[in-house]
Image: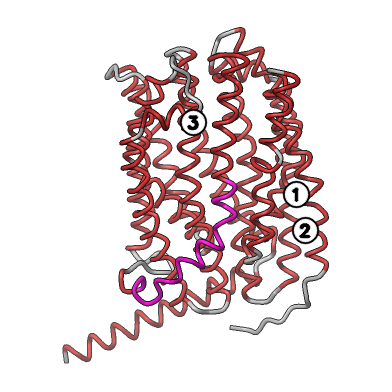
Amino acid sequence: MFVYKILITMKRDEKMRQNKEINQYEKMTTWPIPKLIITLGIPTTISMLVTNIYNMADTYFVSELGNSASGAVGVVFGLMAIIQAFGFMFGHGAGSIIARKLGQKDSHSASIFASLSVAACLCSGALISILGLIFIEPLMKLLGSTETILPYAKGYGIYILIAAPLTMTSFALNNILRYEGKAFFAMIGLTIGGILNIIFDPILIFGFDMGIAGAGLSTAISQAVGFLILLSMFLRGKTLSKLSVKFIKENPKGIFEIMATGFPSLCRQGLNSIATMTLNNLAGGVGGDAAVAAMSIVNRISFFIFAVGLGIGQGFQPVASFNYGAKIYSRVKKAFFFTFGAGEVLLGVLVVIGLLFSNHLIGIFRDDPTVIDIGTLSLKLQLLALFFHPLTICSNMLFQSIGENKKATFLSMLRSGILFIPILLILTEFFGLFGVQSAQAIADVFAFFISAPLVLSFLKKLPEDQYDLY
């Protein structure tokens, strides 16, 4: 009798799992494209905005400690970009494969790749944490710290390094949830963590008199809480993919497929880190701590606005992966053009607002005339260049989502690497501070004109739909 009840329970659980898969398949392959992308994109956008708000909260509260402390936030931002680079590589790589596997109705393989991704993040994050803490002073100098910024950068960076394994794994879990079409669950973890960081920042920085170390500890706590919330979604059966050591043992070589698919994200984020290092070093050389602080503030504000377009774009990724795996190519095309158009409209509105209040936005973070003067011009140029972002973003996301790794890698390297770094070096050499202020905007425009013909040609060559019903 006892065995019979166990068998009945197992059959019931399996039936519920199959129904969950069928419902998700129907949602991803039959819902109207605008409704589907908006449904997936809004939680992702909220997550990104909250994440950026708490990053900006760090910038705001730390700026009260002076220009050197403000500059330290920009320096450590390069370290965070390294951590994000690996988290996104394993998260985007696994997520893209998982979505295509689910589109092919193979949830078991999806669980294998999810488990591999999480294990890789925990191991890689631990390695970065250990090496970073051992070599923290040379690391901060490499990231662009001046001698006056260095004590602040170390105090902030220690806690970021301690939290690296959990931070990196959070990025992976978040992306797996998004690619499964569970953007709302992904939003919960990031949002709660972000809100906690905003609350703890002033308490630890000023209330406990920890200074910039308080901002670092606040970020570490928020990342740990976010990690636990995201992990609980998998442990509580809210996802189609499962996490288990036994899945890792089934196909350990699958990690190489994850890395190949996620390599564009590693390139993009890794080059962002190198670009930040280069920018900080050049800004400090031509404008001192004020220039480093100004560019740090500008990058935070620009990315906050940019996050709106990026959030909608990340709502597009699971739609592209799932339908490409299901061979419903017409929906891939429709999703691309809808996302591109929506991004232009949303960013356009925010850009206009940003242009009207550029100097006020810089002044919120640092009431220093030199910082405001340097930052205002750079912010206006970067805001104007945001009109060129939606197509570039959508192109990169499309190729990565469907497994076109070479094209995705090339496009991911354009904005912050192939174009930006040489342009930054050349313009700074000839125009000094103005080169630092204008390089990113010029690189963004060039990236648009390179991406457009590549993606339009690919979309024209997509075959007719070849799908079957569940």
> Alpha-carbon distance for marks 2 and 3?
34 Å
Q: Which residue corresponds to the image point at 56% horizontal and 57% vertical from the top-left?
A: 263
Q: In this view, does 9 lie above or below 308?
A: below
Residue 57 percent coordinates (x, y): 47, 27
> Alpha-carbon distance for marks 1 and 2?
9 Å
At label 1, the amino acid type is Leu
Where is mark 2, residue-wise? 455
Residue 390 percent coordinates (x, y): 72, 46
Discs 1, 2 touching: Cβ within 8 Å = yes
Residue 307 percent coordinates (x, y): 60, 41
Q: Is residue 1 above or below residue 58?
A: below
Lower sequence index among marks 1 and 2: 1
Lower sequence index among marks 1 and 3: 3
Q: In this view, does 420 lie above or below 369?
A: below
Q: Nearer the viewer, mark 1 or mark 3?
A: 3
Where is mark 1, residue-wise? 391
